[in-house]
Amino acid sequence: MKIIKKIFQENKLFFFNYNHNSFFEGMYRLFAILISPIFIKFNPNLISFLSLFIGFIGLFFSTFLSLDIRLIIIFFLLSFILDFTDGLVARHTNKSSFYGRFIDGLFDIFVIGFLHIVLLMHLIVTGFLSIDKYYFVFFLVTICIMPIQHLILDRFSALARWCNEINKNKYIRPYYRNTFFSKLTMTFFDLQHLSLFLILFTSLKNLPSVIILYFILSFSSSILSIIIYITLSKKNFNKISNKKDNYE
């Protein structure tokens, strides 16, 4: 209980405060704190691998064991909670590292990708979606554009930090999540995760509608992020020379 109270105090700023986190991020963080004593002696990177493994198990069970989609979603929700647990444990035990941050972001992409595949497979297996229909392309594009969104964001972040080293007179924020369309971005996140929880309590007959809603929200969120960072890259990088880069 003492560990939970201390970690809670360290993270109370992020609970259900739309200036810092979306509602569901706050909820996942709260669950992560509650289970953190179980993992407090674990290496944080091991928790990240465990999060990835549970997401993969969800994909495996959905593909080869044909478990109910609602049971599969529980695996992914647990993976999301562990995704917050690794960071909490790392900061609490002073074991934060850039390697941990690297694999944490990378595994996020894998797990969310697994989730998209599971949901798409459910639409196909239940006969709601056929791969020979033209609108099947939308679902494929949504799956492919999600990692591209993260690639653009990380590319922007890396170049922003590089520009800050070269040009000391101008500071470029590596991330604009909480300052540029932050409310809209977090609303998309919340609606996506709300749709996942709706899957748990929706009848099989209405599940396809909820899954399609999730894909529409995912696509919209990715497009918004891509537009934001491409626009900001032109605004911030266009007049900064990369001459130094050419000689390295």
Image: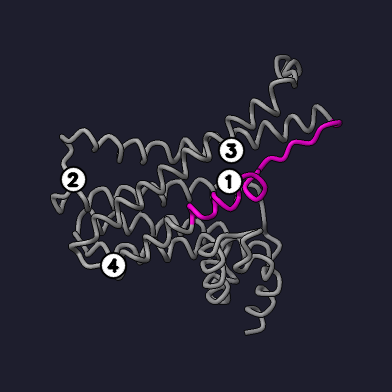
Residue 218: horizontal and vertical position, in percent?
41, 47
Q: Position of residue 186 (x, y in %)?
A: 54, 54
Label 3 sits on residue: 154
Per the image, the residue denoted by label 2 is 129
153 sits to left or right of 235: left
Q: Earlier in the sequence, mark 3 or mark 2?
A: 2
Which of these two is toward me, 124 or 221? 221
**Which image quadrant is residue 152 in?**
top right
Q: Which residue is mark 4?
A: 71
Task: Work out whether mark 3 precedes mark 4 in sequence or the reverse, and give the earlier one.
Answer: 4
- CB under 8 Å between callouts 2 and 1? no
Q: Quadrant of the C terminus?
A: top right
Tell me which label, 2 or 4, sits earlier in the chain.
4
Q: Quadrant of the N terminus?
A: bottom right
Q: Are marks 3 and 1 in contact (CB under 8 Å)?
A: no
Q: CA distance from mark 3 to mark 4?
A: 33 Å
Which amino acid is tagged 4?
Leu
